[in-house]
Amino acid sequence: MATAVPMRPAMTEAEWQARQELAACYRVFDMLGWSEMIYNHITVKVPDEDGAFLINPFGLHFSEVTASSLVKIDIDGNKLDDSPYPVNRAGFVQHALFHRHLPDAHCIMHTHTTAGMAVSSLEGGLQPINFYACNFAGQIAYHDFEGVTVRDEEGERLLANLGDKRVMLLRNHGILAMGRTLPEAFIRHWSLQRACEIQLATLSMGRPLTVAPEVIAVHQRDLHMAQVPGGPGAADFAAMVRLVDRRDTSWRN
């Protein structure tokens, strides 16, 4: 007996492509061990629709998210589709704030990884003691913990602390990364996560070697020469999606 193929919801081709890319990203995060029960969020703006973005259904694990199950909401948190799933206010408040005020924040990622939370809880935060950490020297913002992010009034301080940066360590909380594209946000999150993991390992062994500012400047100047054509993170993210597809392709539905 033939297996029934799920019906694709009615929407623009651009929205469907955005849904598939975002669903793939949730599966990639899960594959990399960055899931946190049913919590944390990755959001993307809906192409050609002002103020609309996609977010994960509250109640599904990252490994269960599919293109059609993503929830479409407006900047005020109102559902724009007939999804049966609720939206986590703790995710919506923070993400809607940045989507509303930052034109270049097409994709926003927030996680509670062990390494990210640990370094965000450390006096001094991320230190320039490894290759990946040097990527972020002078380019990472910090925001003090104020409790679970469900209050709109915290937004003004979040924006002020972010400034012109697009990567932030939420102190005692975790990683926040954003980008002009989903792959760009992904490679920023991945690199910051690696920097945090390596810092934890290094500090557990003793006194670290700190990279000199003049070396960091050369490193950041030359980083573009080690990137594959196609835009920041594009080849990296595509490689991760291929790995996900070897496990499970249900995210495409």
Image (cartoon, rainbow, N blue to C red):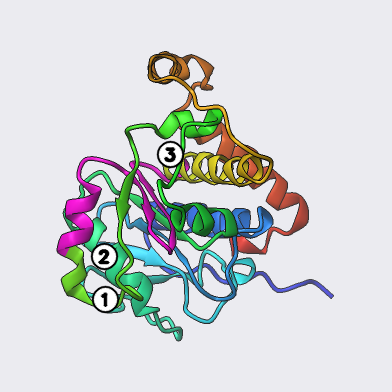
Determine the CA span between mark 2 and mark 1: 8 Å
Determine whether, in the image, residue 61 is placed left or right of residue 10: right
In the image, the segment drawn in magenta is 156-183
Residue assigned mark 2: 96
Is residue 59 positioned above or below 18 on the image?
below
Residue 80 position within the rendered picture, expressed as x and y whole percent measured from the top left: 30, 75
Residue assigned mark 3: 184
Provide the secondary structure element on which disc 2 rests.
Answer: helix
Residue assigned mark 1: 77
Is residue 218 positioned above or below 43 on the image?
above
Q: Is residue 55 visible?
A: yes
Q: Quadrant of the N terminus?
A: bottom right
Q: In the depicted view, which residue is nearer to us: 15 or 218?
A: 218
Query: Is the C-beta separation of discs 2 and 1 under 8 Å?
Result: yes
Q: Residues within 10 Å of mark 3 (few under 14, many from 20)?
A: many
- Give the residue at x 68% y 56%: 31
